[in-house]
Amino acid sequence: MAKIYDTKDHPFELRHEVKRLNTRLDDIATALEKSDFLDMIENYTNPKKRLISNFTAGLSRGLGLTLGTAVVLALLGWLISLFVDLPLVGEYIGQLQQYIDSYKQQ
């Protein structure tokens, strides 16, 4: 038969253990509050919220990629325009520009 643990036998140890466990539970509760765990659970259990957040994330990504590509291409075009005066690169770009102009006239 298992011996029932009597609190009168070790009152100090039990109080110390309860205090330690309460401190640990407070730390866990604080960590959950900081991580917005409730918001994450609500977001994943509500399909409407999930659709809206995924839609706005997709729009943001698409807009960011478009703007980023435009900036990179503009900088690349500006950088290439600096090399037009160089003999070898300038001739190549000039030929490319003539080819594009002749294609536009057709």
Image (cartoon, rainbow, N blue to C red):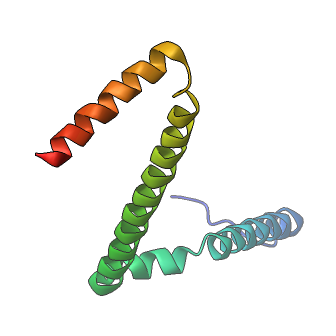
Res 19 → quadrant: bottom right
Which part of the image, by quadrant, shows the C terminus? top left
The correct choice, above or below, for 46 with respect to 9 in the image is below
Q: Residue at x 47, y 13 (%)?
A: 88
Q: Residue at x 65, y 76 (%)?
A: 33
Judged left or right of residue 93, residue 85 is right
Q: Residue at x 33, y 35 (%)?
A: 97
Image spot of residue 52 (x, y percent): 34, 81
Closer to the camera, 103 or 14? Answer: 103
Res 75 → quadrant: top right
Image spot of residue 5 (x, y percent): 67, 65
Q: Residue at x 35, y 67 (%)?
A: 58
Q: Residue furthest top?
A: 88
Closer to the camera, 73 or 37? Answer: 73
Closer to the camera, 6 or 25? Answer: 25
Image spot of residue 25 (x, y percent): 69, 70
Image spot of residue 44 (x, y percent): 36, 75
Q: How many marks?
A: 0
Judged left or right of residue 66, residue 105 is left
Q: Residue furthest left?
A: 106
